Image (spheres, rainbow, N blue to C red):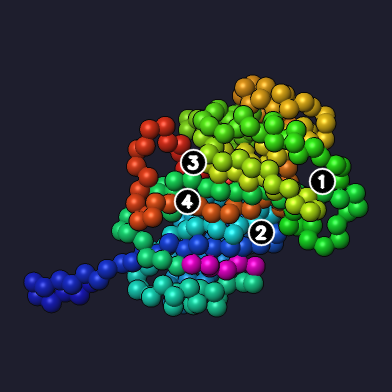
Amino acid sequence: MLGNGSLTIVWPVPTYLLTIAYHGTAFHGWQQQGTLRTVQQAMVNAFAAIDCPRVHVEGAGRTDAGVHAFGQCAHATIKRAFPPDRLLMALNSNLPDDVAVQRVQLAPDGFHARFHARGKRYVYRCASARIRPAIGRDLFHWVRRPVDLVAMRTAAQCLVGRHDFASFASSSGYPRQRGTVRALHHVHLLARPAGFDFVVQGGGFLYNMVRNLVGTLLEVGYGNRPPTWFKEVLMARERKAAGPTAPPHGLYLLAVLYAKDLSPAGDEPGREPAAEEG
């Protein structure tokens, strides 16, 4: 801001939307946590290195230690205006090797990466093998026993739509006043030559929800439970009714979904609270 008598010039303060990928193994998740190594802290440090100190980088949601991302999103409002491509290269020049900004775009005034998000897409990757994999074990969940994907697909059919997912939420990870009802729009189990992927997209996710879904579906895949049991778990709305939590290193945040013009989601009927880590 420049003052000259009665003339005041206010320079625009731009907000940028950042799409970020990271290998989560060596990070204690997204959220800043004191001296622990986190993705958010790495981003703050990168801004400081390009003469933008004390920038708050607000993520679209948290991911836990060991969780990976191809398309985490965050916004930052800074006092210097950069062409998006220049900011992209400047940040990546100052980030560690296990995190990289994939895209930078100008966002409208007041844009918020979390509250303007309309949904998220996750994938949970499993490798099926009798022998322990020696390479890449931090990038997928090793499933030692054969699984019945047909039975798992049959069980997962009940997930599409709007349901109370309390059975698949870690109780310490969400405020109870926000409720446990969420809507899932797409659920797929995709076979791969050496395993399978569980892909899910929805308007919002409870804490550890995707990992709890996978851990419970594997009980069906192993033949420990029939496919009909899975719907019983969903209807129970009790975490103790479900199976174990799958480990974090199989989980990837694929994308955060926004309107094309990055406009707010607004008060859409039945809209869930902003998503958290799955």
Cα distance between the residues tagged 3 and 2: 23 Å
Circles 1, 3 touching at the beta carbon (< 8 Å): no
**Residue at (32%, 55%) from the top-left corner?**
110
Q: Nearer the viewer, residue 243 or 228?
A: 228
Disc 1 target residue:
143
Cα distance between the residues tagged 1 and 2: 20 Å
Could one spot residue 34 in this view of the protein? Answer: no
Q: Amino acid at mark 2?
A: Gly
Location of residue 33 in the rendering, given as x and y in whole percent from the top left corner: 58, 55
Disc 3 target residue:
203
Q: Position of 89 compared to 147: left or right?
A: left
Per the rendering, the mark at residue 257 is 4
Q: Secondary structure at mark 1?
A: strand
- Quadrant assignment, res 95: bottom right
- Quadrant assignment, res 160: top right
First in sequence: mark 1 or mark 2?
2
Number of residues whose C-alpha sits closer than 10 Å to that of mark 4, classed few (under 14), some (14–19) or many (20 or more): many
First in sequence: mark 3 or mark 2?
2
Magenta stretch: give its range.
98-103
Q: Nearer the viewer, residue 11 or 184?
A: 184
Task: Check if residue 100 falls in the magenta segment.
Answer: yes
Image depth: mark 4 or mark 2 in front: 4
Disc 2 target residue:
24
Would you place residue 66 above or below residue 239 in this image?
below
First in sequence: mark 4 or mark 1?
1
Cα distance between the residues tagged 4 and 1: 30 Å
First in sequence: mark 4 or mark 2?
2
Q: Position of 14 compared to 151: left or right?
A: left
Could one spot residue 275 in this view of the protein? Answer: yes
Cα distance between the residues tagged 3 and 4: 9 Å
Q: Amino acid at mark 4?
A: Leu
